[in-house]
Image (tube, rainbow, N blue to C red):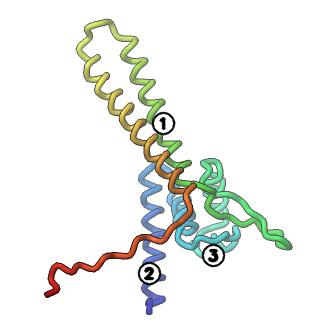
Amino acid sequence: MTDPASVSATRADFIEKIGLITQAEGLPRIAGRVFGLLIFDGDAVSFGDLAIRLQVSRGSISSSIRLLEERGLVKRVAKPGDRQDYFQLAPNPYVTMLEGIRKRARSTRDDIAQTIDSLPPGNDAIGRLKEYAAFYASTDAAIGMAISDLKTANSTPKAKPPAASKDHSHDT
């Protein structure tokens, strides 16, 4: 049997970790905590419940939800007979995250290419800049494969993972 206190501590730790990761990426920590809560809990949560569960102001929740909605990570839903707004993970939020990263990588690669184009032929920085642009081109390609993999995984029926096989090498 699972210890509820242990699960609760793991949940709180996960939500806080996602907040810190999000903050390290330049976004508000509360937005990451909202995202982490929605991932962990998996259900639609009302605006007020988000503020209570995360012990933050309604203003912080409002700006965080707005940011997460703009990025396509969270969607607003309604429940019949209830006037409150509820929030849940948007479909394929991880694909959406990768698409944003890919867009930024492409933009950076293009900025580097403009710099290369503005330099006179033979400038000693061109080789280094081309390597830097190649890094972003490679990142773009890798993210494209990850997006494809996620889309494929999300479109195939969920199957149970294969049962672990027993190791009989020590049996006599």
Task: Residue type at mark 3: give it.
Answer: Ile
Within the image, what quadrant is residue 57 found in? bottom right
- In the image, residue 117 lies at what x, y percent? 39, 12
Among all residues in the image, which is located at the extreme bottom?
1
- In the image, residue 68 lies at what x, y percent? 61, 54
Alpha carbon distance from label 1 to label 3: 34 Å
Which residue is rendered at x = 21% and y = 81% of the image? 168
**Mark before the other along the chain sequence, 2 or 3:** 2
Residue position for label 3:
52
Q: Nearer the viewer, residue 71 or 20?
A: 71
Task: Residue type at mark 2: give it.
Answer: Ala
- In the image, residue 97 lies at what x, y percent? 52, 49
Alpha carbon distance from label 1 to label 2: 35 Å
Left or right relative to 90: residue 133: left
Quadrant in the picture for the C terminus: bottom left
Which residue is rendered at x = 53% and y = 50% of the image? 151
Element at label 1: helix
- Residues under numbered marks 1 and 2 in contact, where contact means CB atoms less than 8 Å apart: no
Mark seen at residue 9 = 2
